[in-house]
Amino acid sequence: EGEAIICAASQLTPEARQALSFILQELEAGREPTSREAAEKVGLTPTGLGMQLSKSGIKAKNTRREMKSVKIYTKPMIGRIREILSKN
């Protein structure tokens, strides 16, 4: 499983890289962006972005905001996102 993640991580699409950069900026600013916010930033659907990022081991977590179910990227992901971006 670890090898698959490493191989997939080296093939980030431009949209996935841009989304990871946006997610990292938001997390470093103390905000946890939703999958929809990140996807809209790069012109993908949340599902499409999720499929691309999950190949690198980044998966949004389910939670509730304002009485709605949403998927967010959380602060513990910062280290993994930095690692992925530094290799690509």
Image: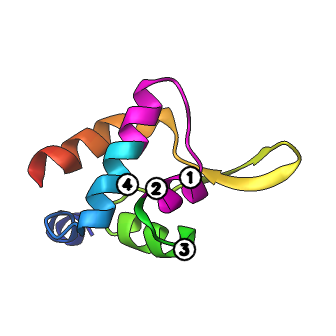
Tag 4's secondary structure?
helix
Give me the C-alpha separation between circle 4 and circle 3: 13 Å
Give me the C-alpha separation between circle 2 and circle 3: 14 Å
Q: Residues within 10 Å of mark 2 (few under 14, many from 20)?
A: some
Left/right placement of residue 24 relative to residue 88 reads right
Task: Quadrant for residue 15, please give it.
Answer: bottom left
Which residue has dot 3 on it? 47
Q: Which mark is residue 41?
A: 2
The picture places residue 59, in percent across and down from the top left corner, at 48, 58
Is residue 67 depicted above or below 12 in this figure?
above
Viewer-side residue, 14 vs 80: 14
Q: Residues within 10 Å of mark 3 (few under 14, many from 20)?
A: few
Is residue 84 depicted above or below 9 in this figure?
above
Which residue has dot 1 on it? 37
Instruction: Check the picture and name the quadrant holding the N terminus.
Output: bottom left
Q: Residue at x 47, y 67 (%)?
A: 50
1 or 4: tag closer to the N-terminus: 4
Give me the C-alpha separation between circle 1 and circle 4: 9 Å
Q: Residues within 10 Å of mark 4 (few under 14, many from 20)?
A: many
The answer to whether mark 1 and mark 3 are in CB contact below 8 A is no
The picture places residue 60, in percent across and down from the top left corner, at 54, 55
Tag 2's secondary structure?
helix
Q: Which residues are magenta?
A: 23-41
Left/right placement of residue 45 relative to residue 43 reads right
The answer to whether mark 1 and mark 2 are in CB contact below 8 A is yes
Give me the C-alpha separation between circle 1 and circle 2: 6 Å
The answer to whether mark 2 and mark 3 are in CB contact below 8 A is no
Q: Residue at x 21, y 50 (%)?
A: 84
* Amino acid type, mark 3: Thr
Which residue has dot 4 on it? 19
